[in-house]
Image (cartoon, rainbow, N blue to C red):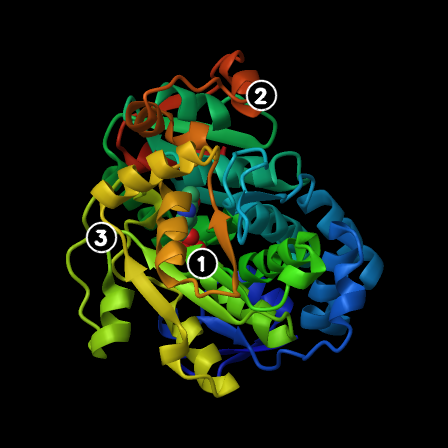
Protein backbone atom coordinates (compact mmCIF):
# COMPACT_ATOMS: atom_id res chain seq x y z
CA UNK A 1 0.00 0.00 0.00
CA UNK A 2 1.36 3.41 -0.96
CA UNK A 3 0.34 6.53 0.86
CA UNK A 4 1.26 10.16 0.38
CA UNK A 5 1.27 13.16 2.68
CA UNK A 6 -1.64 15.41 1.65
CA UNK A 7 0.40 18.52 2.51
CA UNK A 8 3.56 17.31 0.76
CA UNK A 9 2.58 14.73 -1.87
CA UNK A 10 6.23 14.03 -2.61
CA UNK A 11 6.51 12.39 0.81
CA UNK A 12 5.46 8.78 0.18
CA UNK A 13 5.36 5.87 2.60
CA UNK A 14 4.11 2.30 2.76
CA UNK A 15 1.51 1.01 5.22
CA UNK A 16 4.09 0.00 7.83
CA UNK A 17 5.75 3.42 7.79
CA UNK A 18 2.41 5.24 7.93
CA UNK A 19 1.32 3.17 10.93
CA UNK A 20 4.62 3.68 12.77
CA UNK A 21 4.91 7.39 12.01
CA UNK A 22 1.27 8.44 12.36
CA UNK A 23 1.77 11.86 10.79
CA UNK A 24 3.91 13.12 7.92
CA UNK A 25 6.02 16.25 7.54
CA UNK A 26 4.38 19.46 8.84
CA UNK A 27 1.72 17.38 10.60
CA UNK A 28 0.43 16.33 7.15
CA UNK A 29 -2.02 13.42 6.95
CA UNK A 30 -1.20 10.26 5.05
CA UNK A 31 -3.67 9.16 2.40
CA UNK A 32 -3.84 6.04 0.21
CA UNK A 33 -2.57 6.65 -3.32
CA UNK A 34 -5.04 4.15 -4.74
CA UNK A 35 -8.41 2.93 -3.45
CA UNK A 36 -9.52 -0.03 -5.54
CA UNK A 37 -13.07 -0.41 -6.83
CA UNK A 38 -14.43 -3.76 -5.66
CA UNK A 39 -16.70 -5.47 -8.14
CA UNK A 40 -17.90 -8.28 -5.86
CA UNK A 41 -19.86 -6.27 -3.28
CA UNK A 42 -22.75 -8.75 -3.03
CA UNK A 43 -20.34 -11.63 -2.44
CA UNK A 44 -18.58 -9.60 0.24
CA UNK A 45 -21.83 -8.73 1.96
CA UNK A 46 -22.69 -12.43 2.21
CA UNK A 47 -19.55 -13.13 4.31
CA UNK A 48 -19.28 -12.99 8.10
CA UNK A 49 -17.72 -9.86 9.66
CA UNK A 50 -14.16 -11.07 10.21
CA UNK A 51 -13.76 -12.79 6.85
CA UNK A 52 -15.32 -9.88 4.97
CA UNK A 53 -13.21 -7.32 6.85
CA UNK A 54 -10.06 -9.28 6.05
CA UNK A 55 -10.91 -9.11 2.34
CA UNK A 56 -11.69 -5.38 2.45
CA UNK A 57 -8.51 -4.56 4.38
CA UNK A 58 -6.53 -6.92 2.14
CA UNK A 59 -7.75 -5.02 -0.93
CA UNK A 60 -6.70 -1.72 0.65
CA UNK A 61 -3.39 -2.77 2.21
CA UNK A 62 -2.29 -5.17 -0.53
CA UNK A 63 0.68 -7.53 -0.48
CA UNK A 64 2.44 -5.79 2.36
CA UNK A 65 0.78 -7.98 4.98
CA UNK A 66 0.23 -11.68 4.24
CA UNK A 67 -3.46 -12.67 4.22
CA UNK A 68 -3.12 -15.20 7.05
CA UNK A 69 -1.53 -12.58 9.26
CA UNK A 70 -4.15 -10.00 8.34
CA UNK A 71 -6.92 -12.45 9.20
CA UNK A 72 -5.38 -12.98 12.65
CA UNK A 73 -5.12 -9.21 13.18
CA UNK A 74 -8.78 -8.72 12.28
CA UNK A 75 -9.81 -11.67 14.43
CA UNK A 76 -7.95 -10.22 17.42
CA UNK A 77 -9.33 -6.73 16.87
CA UNK A 78 -12.98 -7.34 15.98
CA UNK A 79 -14.03 -9.47 18.93
CA UNK A 80 -17.49 -7.94 19.28
CA UNK A 81 -20.47 -7.40 16.97
CA UNK A 82 -21.84 -4.24 15.28
CA UNK A 83 -25.58 -4.96 15.08
CA UNK A 84 -28.18 -2.74 13.46
CA UNK A 85 -31.44 -1.96 15.24
CA UNK A 86 -34.66 -0.91 13.56
CA UNK A 87 -35.86 2.40 15.02
CA UNK A 88 -38.56 3.23 12.46
CA UNK A 89 -39.74 1.47 9.29
CA UNK A 90 -37.11 3.15 7.15
CA UNK A 91 -34.55 4.12 9.81
CA UNK A 92 -31.89 1.92 11.40
CA UNK A 93 -29.26 2.48 14.08
CA UNK A 94 -25.78 0.99 13.63
CA UNK A 95 -24.63 0.16 17.15
CA UNK A 96 -20.86 0.55 17.36
CA UNK A 97 -20.64 0.41 21.14
CA UNK A 98 -20.46 -3.29 21.96
CA UNK A 99 -16.67 -3.32 22.41
CA UNK A 100 -14.70 -3.39 25.68
CA UNK A 101 -14.88 0.38 26.27
CA UNK A 102 -18.42 0.78 24.92
CA UNK A 103 -17.55 3.24 22.16
CA UNK A 104 -16.87 2.97 18.44
CA UNK A 105 -13.23 3.95 18.97
CA UNK A 106 -12.66 0.34 20.02
CA UNK A 107 -12.79 -0.66 16.32
CA UNK A 108 -10.04 1.69 15.17
CA UNK A 109 -8.01 1.51 18.36
CA UNK A 110 -7.89 -2.27 18.48
CA UNK A 111 -6.96 -2.64 14.83
CA UNK A 112 -4.28 0.05 15.16
CA UNK A 113 -2.78 -1.88 18.09
CA UNK A 114 -2.70 -5.06 15.99
CA UNK A 115 -1.19 -3.17 13.05
CA UNK A 116 1.50 -1.59 15.17
CA UNK A 117 2.36 -4.93 16.76
CA UNK A 118 2.70 -6.39 13.23
CA UNK A 119 4.82 -3.67 11.58
CA UNK A 120 6.80 -2.56 14.61
CA UNK A 121 10.20 -3.92 13.61
CA UNK A 122 12.75 -4.62 16.35
CA UNK A 123 13.12 -2.79 19.60
CA UNK A 124 10.94 -1.73 22.44
CA UNK A 125 7.77 0.31 21.97
CA UNK A 126 6.24 2.52 24.63
CA UNK A 127 2.89 4.10 23.97
CA UNK A 128 2.58 7.29 26.02
CA UNK A 129 -0.66 9.22 26.12
CA UNK A 130 -2.61 11.63 28.30
CA UNK A 131 -6.33 11.26 28.74
CA UNK A 132 -9.25 13.12 30.22
CA UNK A 133 -11.12 9.80 30.29
CA UNK A 134 -12.26 7.97 27.19
CA UNK A 135 -9.31 7.79 24.84
CA UNK A 136 -7.16 6.34 27.61
CA UNK A 137 -9.62 3.52 28.11
CA UNK A 138 -9.75 2.68 24.41
CA UNK A 139 -5.92 2.72 24.10
CA UNK A 140 -5.44 0.64 27.27
CA UNK A 141 -7.86 -2.06 26.19
CA UNK A 142 -6.60 -2.10 22.61
CA UNK A 143 -2.96 -2.72 23.61
CA UNK A 144 -3.62 -4.87 26.68
CA UNK A 145 -1.65 -8.11 26.52
CA UNK A 146 0.37 -7.28 23.38
CA UNK A 147 3.96 -8.49 23.71
CA UNK A 148 6.81 -5.99 24.01
CA UNK A 149 4.56 -2.97 23.89
CA UNK A 150 4.32 -0.98 27.11
CA UNK A 151 1.54 1.50 27.58
CA UNK A 152 1.73 4.43 29.99
CA UNK A 153 -1.34 6.61 30.45
CA UNK A 154 -1.36 9.87 32.38
CA UNK A 155 -4.57 11.36 33.73
CA UNK A 156 -5.47 14.20 36.10
CA UNK A 157 -5.97 12.78 39.60
CA UNK A 158 -9.52 13.20 40.86
CA UNK A 159 -10.66 14.88 37.65
CA UNK A 160 -12.12 11.93 35.77
CA UNK A 161 -15.17 10.00 36.89
CA UNK A 162 -14.48 7.05 39.26
CA UNK A 163 -16.12 4.72 36.75
CA UNK A 164 -13.96 5.98 33.88
CA UNK A 165 -10.90 5.49 36.06
CA UNK A 166 -11.89 1.90 36.89
CA UNK A 167 -12.32 1.05 33.24
CA UNK A 168 -8.63 1.48 32.35
CA UNK A 169 -6.72 1.58 35.65
CA UNK A 170 -7.53 -1.99 36.68
CA UNK A 171 -5.89 -3.90 33.82
CA UNK A 172 -2.28 -4.27 34.97
CA UNK A 173 0.12 -6.30 32.80
CA UNK A 174 1.62 -4.08 30.10
CA UNK A 175 -0.73 -1.19 30.95
CA UNK A 176 0.56 1.32 33.52
CA UNK A 177 -1.56 4.28 34.56
CA UNK A 178 -0.38 7.35 36.46
CA UNK A 179 -2.66 9.76 38.33
CA UNK A 180 -0.93 13.12 38.04
CA UNK A 181 -1.53 15.73 40.75
CA UNK A 182 -2.52 18.39 38.20
CA UNK A 183 -5.05 19.07 35.45
CA UNK A 184 -5.40 17.51 31.99
CA UNK A 185 -3.40 20.25 30.26
CA UNK A 186 -0.47 19.51 32.57
CA UNK A 187 -0.70 15.81 31.66
CA UNK A 188 -0.62 16.71 27.98
CA UNK A 189 2.34 19.01 28.54
CA UNK A 190 4.24 16.15 30.23
CA UNK A 191 3.57 13.90 27.24
CA UNK A 192 4.75 16.60 24.86
CA UNK A 193 7.92 17.07 26.90
CA UNK A 194 8.60 13.34 26.67
CA UNK A 195 8.22 13.37 22.87
CA UNK A 196 10.53 16.41 22.65
CA UNK A 197 13.24 14.50 24.55
CA UNK A 198 15.10 12.75 21.72
CA UNK A 199 17.21 10.61 24.06
CA UNK A 200 14.18 9.34 25.94
CA UNK A 201 12.24 8.81 22.73
CA UNK A 202 15.01 6.63 21.36
CA UNK A 203 15.62 4.72 24.59
CA UNK A 204 12.06 3.51 25.07
CA UNK A 205 10.71 3.70 21.51
CA UNK A 206 8.08 6.31 22.21
CA UNK A 207 4.97 6.16 20.03
CA UNK A 208 1.78 8.17 20.36
CA UNK A 209 -0.75 5.72 18.83
CA UNK A 210 -2.21 8.91 17.44
CA UNK A 211 -5.90 9.22 16.65
CA UNK A 212 -4.98 10.32 13.13
CA UNK A 213 -3.30 6.98 12.34
CA UNK A 214 -4.40 5.60 8.96
CA UNK A 215 -4.90 2.09 10.37
CA UNK A 216 -7.82 3.35 12.45
CA UNK A 217 -9.65 4.68 9.41
CA UNK A 218 -9.14 1.50 7.43
CA UNK A 219 -10.63 -0.56 10.25
CA UNK A 220 -13.65 1.72 10.46
CA UNK A 221 -14.42 1.17 6.76
CA UNK A 222 -15.42 -2.39 7.67
CA UNK A 223 -18.46 -1.58 9.78
CA UNK A 224 -20.17 0.31 6.96
CA UNK A 225 -20.14 -2.96 5.02
CA UNK A 226 -21.37 -4.77 8.12
CA UNK A 227 -24.35 -2.41 8.32
CA UNK A 228 -25.27 -2.90 4.67
CA UNK A 229 -24.95 -6.67 5.07
CA UNK A 230 -27.59 -6.70 7.78
CA UNK A 231 -30.14 -4.50 5.99
CA UNK A 232 -32.96 -6.24 4.16
CA UNK A 233 -31.89 -6.43 0.48
CA UNK A 234 -34.63 -4.07 -0.74
CA UNK A 235 -33.45 -1.43 1.73
CA UNK A 236 -29.81 -1.47 0.63
CA UNK A 237 -30.71 0.71 -2.35
CA UNK A 238 -31.11 4.44 -1.68
CA UNK A 239 -29.20 4.19 1.56
CA UNK A 240 -28.44 7.48 3.34
CA UNK A 241 -25.94 7.39 6.23
CA UNK A 242 -25.76 10.00 8.99
CA UNK A 243 -22.50 10.24 10.93
CA UNK A 244 -22.15 12.10 14.25
CA UNK A 245 -18.92 13.98 13.61
CA UNK A 246 -16.15 15.54 15.66
CA UNK A 247 -12.79 15.02 14.01
CA UNK A 248 -14.46 13.50 10.93
CA UNK A 249 -12.51 10.23 10.99
CA UNK A 250 -15.70 8.23 11.05
CA UNK A 251 -17.10 10.07 8.04
CA UNK A 252 -13.80 9.65 6.15
CA UNK A 253 -14.03 5.89 6.67
CA UNK A 254 -17.58 5.89 5.31
CA UNK A 255 -16.46 7.80 2.22
CA UNK A 256 -13.68 5.26 1.67
CA UNK A 257 -16.31 2.48 1.86
CA UNK A 258 -18.32 4.28 -0.84
CA UNK A 259 -15.18 4.72 -2.95
CA UNK A 260 -14.59 0.97 -2.68
CA UNK A 261 -18.02 0.49 -4.22
CA UNK A 262 -20.39 0.10 -1.27
CA UNK A 263 -23.66 1.53 -2.57
CA UNK A 264 -24.35 4.49 -0.30
CA UNK A 265 -26.41 7.20 -1.93
CA UNK A 266 -25.36 10.06 0.31
CA UNK A 267 -23.69 10.88 3.60
CA UNK A 268 -24.82 13.36 6.21
CA UNK A 269 -22.31 15.00 8.53
CA UNK A 270 -24.14 15.74 11.78
CA UNK A 271 -22.50 18.01 14.35
CA UNK A 272 -23.37 19.69 17.62
CA UNK A 273 -22.95 23.46 18.16
CA UNK A 274 -19.34 23.07 17.05
CA UNK A 275 -20.51 23.64 13.51
CA UNK A 276 -17.43 24.63 11.49
CA UNK A 277 -18.24 22.09 8.76
CA UNK A 278 -21.98 22.74 8.23
CA UNK A 279 -21.27 26.48 8.10
CA UNK A 280 -18.44 25.88 5.65
CA UNK A 281 -20.60 23.71 3.39
CA UNK A 282 -23.32 26.36 3.32
CA UNK A 283 -21.17 29.49 3.01
CA UNK A 284 -17.88 28.31 1.52
CA UNK A 285 -15.99 30.02 4.35
CA UNK A 286 -13.83 27.99 6.70
CA UNK A 287 -14.09 29.96 9.95
CA UNK A 288 -13.80 27.88 13.13
CA UNK A 289 -15.26 29.46 16.26
CA UNK A 290 -14.01 28.78 19.79
CA UNK A 291 -14.94 25.25 20.84
CA UNK A 292 -18.02 25.09 23.06
CA UNK A 293 -18.96 22.36 25.53
CA UNK A 294 -22.07 20.33 24.62
CA UNK A 295 -23.94 17.19 25.69
CA UNK A 296 -22.23 15.24 22.90
CA UNK A 297 -18.80 16.14 24.20
CA UNK A 298 -16.78 13.68 22.10
CA UNK A 299 -17.78 15.90 19.17
CA UNK A 300 -16.70 19.17 20.78
CA UNK A 301 -14.19 19.91 18.04
CA UNK A 302 -14.09 23.11 16.03
CA UNK A 303 -11.00 22.33 13.93
CA UNK A 304 -11.67 18.77 12.75
CA UNK A 305 -8.31 17.20 11.99
CA UNK A 306 -9.53 14.71 9.37
CA UNK A 307 -11.23 17.31 7.19
CA UNK A 308 -8.35 17.45 4.65
CA UNK A 309 -8.90 13.73 4.04
CA UNK A 310 -12.61 14.31 3.37
CA UNK A 311 -11.85 17.02 0.81
CA UNK A 312 -9.15 14.89 -0.79
CA UNK A 313 -11.64 12.05 -1.34
CA UNK A 314 -14.28 14.32 -2.85
CA UNK A 315 -11.70 15.89 -5.15
CA UNK A 316 -10.19 12.59 -6.28
CA UNK A 317 -13.56 10.94 -6.87
CA UNK A 318 -14.89 13.95 -8.74
CA UNK A 319 -17.75 14.26 -6.26
CA UNK A 320 -19.23 17.69 -5.51
CA UNK A 321 -19.00 18.78 -1.87
CA UNK A 322 -22.63 19.88 -2.20
CA UNK A 323 -23.55 16.16 -2.18
CA UNK A 324 -22.45 16.09 1.46
CA UNK A 325 -25.37 17.26 3.54
CA UNK A 326 -24.62 18.68 6.95
CA UNK A 327 -26.38 20.36 9.84
CA UNK A 328 -25.78 21.21 13.49
CA UNK A 329 -28.06 20.27 16.38
CA UNK A 330 -28.29 22.27 19.63
CA UNK A 331 -28.29 20.70 23.08
CA UNK A 332 -31.97 21.58 23.51
CA UNK A 333 -32.79 19.75 20.26
CA UNK A 334 -30.62 16.83 21.35
CA UNK A 335 -32.63 16.49 24.56
CA UNK A 336 -35.95 16.62 22.68
CA UNK A 337 -34.66 14.06 20.21
CA UNK A 338 -33.54 11.67 22.95
CA UNK A 339 -37.03 11.83 24.44
CA UNK A 340 -38.68 11.27 21.06
CA UNK A 341 -36.42 8.28 20.39
CA UNK A 342 -37.23 6.84 23.79
CA UNK A 343 -40.92 7.17 22.89
CA UNK A 344 -40.19 5.07 19.81
CA UNK A 345 -38.67 2.45 22.09
CA UNK A 346 -35.02 3.19 21.29
CA UNK A 347 -32.71 4.19 24.12
CA UNK A 348 -29.91 6.37 22.75
CA UNK A 349 -27.29 8.85 24.02
CA UNK A 350 -26.45 12.38 22.82
CA UNK A 351 -24.04 11.54 19.94
CA UNK A 352 -26.38 9.07 18.29
CA UNK A 353 -29.30 11.45 18.84
CA UNK A 354 -27.53 14.24 16.94
CA UNK A 355 -27.06 11.90 13.96
CA UNK A 356 -30.66 10.68 14.11
CA UNK A 357 -32.10 14.20 14.24
CA UNK A 358 -30.19 15.44 11.18
CA UNK A 359 -31.15 12.25 9.35
CA UNK A 360 -34.82 12.88 10.13
CA UNK A 361 -34.53 16.39 8.69
CA UNK A 362 -32.79 15.21 5.53
CA UNK A 363 -34.30 11.86 4.59
CA UNK A 364 -36.53 11.80 1.48
CA UNK A 365 -39.41 9.43 0.67
CA UNK A 366 -38.16 6.13 -0.75
CA UNK A 367 -34.81 6.37 1.04
CA UNK A 368 -33.56 4.19 3.88
CA UNK A 369 -31.70 5.98 6.67
CA UNK A 370 -28.90 4.64 8.83
CA UNK A 371 -27.40 6.60 11.70
CA UNK A 372 -24.30 5.66 13.65
CA UNK A 373 -24.54 5.14 17.40
CA UNK A 374 -21.02 5.78 18.59
CA UNK A 375 -21.36 5.21 22.35
CA UNK A 376 -23.35 3.09 24.78
CA UNK A 377 -26.03 5.11 26.64
CA UNK A 378 -24.37 4.14 29.94
CA UNK A 379 -21.23 6.01 28.88
CA UNK A 380 -23.27 9.19 29.19
CA UNK A 381 -25.20 7.96 32.18
CA UNK A 382 -25.66 11.30 33.98
CA UNK A 383 -27.16 13.18 31.03
CA UNK A 384 -29.23 10.26 29.74
CA UNK A 385 -30.71 9.57 33.19
CA UNK A 386 -31.51 13.24 33.72
CA UNK A 387 -33.03 13.84 30.27
CA UNK A 388 -35.10 10.64 30.19
CA UNK A 389 -35.80 10.52 33.91
CA UNK A 390 -34.79 6.91 34.34
CA UNK A 391 -32.05 4.81 35.94
CA UNK A 392 -29.61 2.94 33.73
CA UNK A 393 -28.14 -0.32 34.91
CA UNK A 394 -24.34 -0.64 34.62
CA UNK A 395 -23.45 -2.74 31.57
CA UNK A 396 -21.47 -5.91 32.21
CA UNK A 397 -18.25 -4.50 30.68
CA UNK A 398 -18.22 -1.60 33.16
CA UNK A 399 -19.50 -3.54 36.12
CA UNK A 400 -16.68 -6.08 35.80
CA UNK A 401 -14.00 -3.39 36.08
CA UNK A 402 -15.87 -1.46 38.73
CA UNK A 403 -15.32 -4.34 41.14
CA UNK A 404 -11.53 -4.52 40.59
CA UNK A 405 -8.91 -2.61 42.61
CA UNK A 406 -7.23 0.48 41.12
CA UNK A 407 -3.63 -0.15 40.09
CA UNK A 408 -2.56 3.43 39.28
CA UNK A 409 0.66 5.02 40.45
CA UNK A 410 0.61 8.60 41.63
CA UNK A 411 2.98 11.36 40.62
CA UNK A 412 3.51 15.09 40.96
CA UNK A 413 3.51 17.27 37.84
CA UNK A 414 7.27 16.78 37.46
CA UNK A 415 8.92 15.74 34.20
CA UNK A 416 12.15 14.52 35.85
CA UNK A 417 10.12 12.06 37.89
CA UNK A 418 8.17 10.87 34.85
CA UNK A 419 11.36 10.45 32.85
CA UNK A 420 12.93 8.28 35.54
CA UNK A 421 9.73 6.24 35.76
CA UNK A 422 9.69 5.61 32.01
CA UNK A 423 13.35 4.60 31.91
CA UNK A 424 13.05 2.23 34.86
C1 LIG B 1 -14.85 10.30 18.81
C2 LIG B 1 -16.33 10.25 18.90
C3 LIG B 1 -17.15 10.83 17.90
C4 LIG B 1 -16.61 11.62 16.73
O1 LIG B 1 -15.99 10.79 15.79
P1 LIG B 1 -14.99 11.44 14.71
O2 LIG B 1 -14.43 10.30 13.97
O3 LIG B 1 -13.95 12.19 15.51
O4 LIG B 1 -15.80 12.35 13.88
C5 LIG B 1 -18.53 10.66 18.00
N1 LIG B 1 -19.07 10.02 19.06
C6 LIG B 1 -18.32 9.48 20.04
C7 LIG B 1 -18.99 8.80 21.18
C8 LIG B 1 -16.92 9.57 19.99
O5 LIG B 1 -16.18 9.04 20.98
Mark 3: secondary structure: loop
Q: Position of residue 157 (x, y in %)?
A: 30, 24
Q: Which residue is mark 2?
A: 396
Q: Nearer the viewer, residue 262 or 191?
A: 262
Neighbour tally class for label 2: few under 14, some 14-19, many 20 plus, Cα within 10 Å: few
Q: Position of residue 357 (x, y in %)?
A: 36, 51
Q: Is residue 228 left or right of residue 421?
A: right
Which mark lies nearer to you, 3 or 1? 1
Among the two numbered marks 2 and 1 on one chain, the one whose residue lies closer to the N terminus: 1
Q: Nearer the viewer, residue 405 or 309?
A: 309
Mark 2: secondary structure: helix
Q: Residue at x 23, y 43 (%)?
A: 331
Quarter of the figure with residue 115: bottom right
> Quick one: which residue is furthest to the right in this view?
68
Q: Which residue is mark 3?
A: 273
Q: Which residue is mark 1?
A: 242
**Label 3, label 1: how many angstroms apart (C-alpha)?**
17 Å
Amino acid sequence: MNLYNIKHPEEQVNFAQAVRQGLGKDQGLFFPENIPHLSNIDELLALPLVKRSQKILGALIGEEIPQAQLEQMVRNAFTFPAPIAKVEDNIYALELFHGPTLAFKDFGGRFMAQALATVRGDGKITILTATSGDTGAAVAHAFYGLENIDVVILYPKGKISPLQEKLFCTLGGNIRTIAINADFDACQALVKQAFDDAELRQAIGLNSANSINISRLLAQVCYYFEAAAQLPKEQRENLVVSVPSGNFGNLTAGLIAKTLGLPIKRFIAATNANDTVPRYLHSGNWSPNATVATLSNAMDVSRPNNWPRVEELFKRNGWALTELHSAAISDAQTEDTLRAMNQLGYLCEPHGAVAYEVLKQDLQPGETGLFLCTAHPAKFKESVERILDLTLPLPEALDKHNKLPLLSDEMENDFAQLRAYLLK
